[in-house]
Amino acid sequence: MDLMVNLLGGLQAVADPWVLLFVFLGAIIGLVFGAAPGLTATSAIVLFLPVTYAMGPVTSMALLLGIYCSGYFAGSIPAILINTPGAPGSAATALDGYALAQAGQGDRAIVTAISSSFVGGLFSLTLLALIAPSLARVALSFTSVEYFTFALVGIVCVAGISKGSMMKGLTAAFIGILASTVGLDPVSGVSRFTFGEPNLLGGIPTTAALIGLFAVAQMMLLTRLRDMDAEILPVQERTSVASVWGEMFRNKWLMFKSATIGALIGILPGTGPSIASWVSYSDALRTAGPKDRYGKGDVKGVISCEVSNNAVTGGALVPLLTLGIPGDPVTAVLIGALLIQGIEAGPFFIPQNTELFYAILVLLLCSNILMLVLGLAGRGLAAKVLTIPHGIMVPVILVVAAAGTFSLASNPYYLKLVIMFGVLGYLMVRFKIPTAPAVLGIVLGPILEQNLRNALTASRMDPTVFITRPISAVTLAFMCLLLWVWLKPAKKSGAHEGGDAETNM
């Protein structure tokens, strides 16, 4: 009975025409940003985050969740048509999607990607509705000890799955944590790393840092590239949606496995769609039959990647709404959106904001439906986004970024911070240091510091408290297992290289 009452309350909140308008606009913005090479759903949410200052909680979530769902799918459009993923999570989709486009079946691949993303989104939405309320009740018994270990695992996870060496991922996370310590010490009130600049006493605004690391840095990279000359593809056959859905139904077990993988990886703090799509694709390869043509234009490859890719959306909201710990870089930005509205994510979020939680569930459903409808209706038009010249895209995005940053507090100093973080993000990408761990470091840094100090103060500076409490001990053991799994291949490759060197001598 309570569930029905809560759902009706959520539906009533979403029924506002302004809310429906903004979720529609968010879906369109997500499609455009996801389809444009060099732009991502994260960039779009970061750019439009300042707009939510003048909105209410439900309206702001409508805009951002619309961008969230559509942006994750739309990265598959350039991956399929020009073999250039619009987002990291669409890289695996390009393997079979582009091969299908080369065979004149690009439309079939895009319809499959849209429909698979819809299935993944619905699956993760169901999981969020079932798991989040129960997990929030359990989280009420957690102390600073558990929150510190959860945040630590989040940092380690995002560093471990980063491209390149794990040390580069940890370096990026440390940069983010260091940036989060700028300002007044929360306990002693002493200023830290402000260099006499009064504008830094309140710390570095998370939104300004994110706009610099994502939007500005990416635009700086695009200025170095010439407009893409995509390979001329054969005429693409128009595909019946019904035939694609029939093919997906025949692969329902693959969809279920991929959705489960994506949702579970989304729940794990610090991960995201990139690792989910690759794990799902690897599992599909492992169970491939003799007639499957993975990597050569098999629709199953697109299904496994895109179902898993969008199943991350609801899964990543589970730790955000119940523990206050982001599941991926996009949900890290959503924490800022909630704070703008004076709402704190964590174990008290659902009990204190029940109507908003169920409104988020309804908004996720609306976002996925709009993604499906707009994607299928405008898939030909969406491909036109690929032709936007960099000379137009770069200045427009930079102007929007500057306007959004200045609107944070009408403080021109924030523009300087955006430029500094833009240069930092540019250098990180140039030296192949991932930016995602830095974002998680900025968001999780205060959580790490505050809970570490609270835990040690409550235990009279006894560090063994982190291994004597069962949940914390299990979490740390899980983190050590992950480190062992990720570092083992590196050790093996090092040993092989050493053996080859001795042989050569």
Image: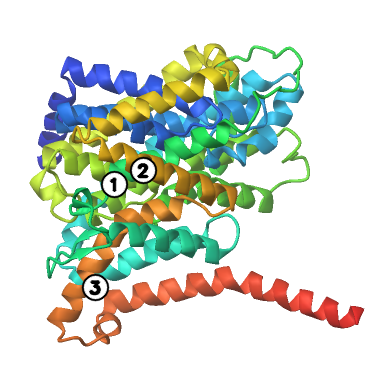
Q: Amino acid at mark 1?
A: Thr
Q: What whole-number distance in Å separates the C-alpha atoms at marks 2 and 3?
A: 25 Å
Q: Nearer the viewer, residue 335 or 263?
A: 335
Q: Which residue is mark 3?
A: 452
Callout 3, which amino acid? Answer: Leu
Asked if the residue at tag 3 contacts the one at tag 2, i.e. Cβ–Cβ closer than 8 Å, the answer is no
Asked if residue 291 lies left or right of residue 317, the reply is right
Q: Residues within 10 Å of mark 1 (few under 14, many from 20)?
A: some
Residue closer to the observer: 291 or 284: 284
Residue at (20% x, 62% y) in the render: 139
Give coordinates of residue 256: x percent, y percent: 49, 43
Q: Secondary structure at mark 1?
A: helix
Q: CA distance from mark 2 to mark 1?
A: 6 Å
Residue 17, image quadrant: top left
- Decide: is 401 above or below 104: below
Disc on the earlier residue, 2 or 3: 2
* Of the two numbered discs 2 and 3 in the rendering, the one whose residue sits closer to the viewer: 2
Query: Which quarter of the figure is the N terminus placed in?
Result: top left
Q: Which residue is mark 1?
A: 206
Judged left or right of residue 407, residue 500 is: right
At a point 11% along the width and 31% down the height, the residue shown is 9
Residue at 14 percent across and 80 percent down: it is 457
Distance between mark 1 and mark 3 Cα atoms: 21 Å
| Circle nearer the viewer, 1 or 3 | 1
Mark 2, residue position: 210
Circle 3 — which element? Answer: helix
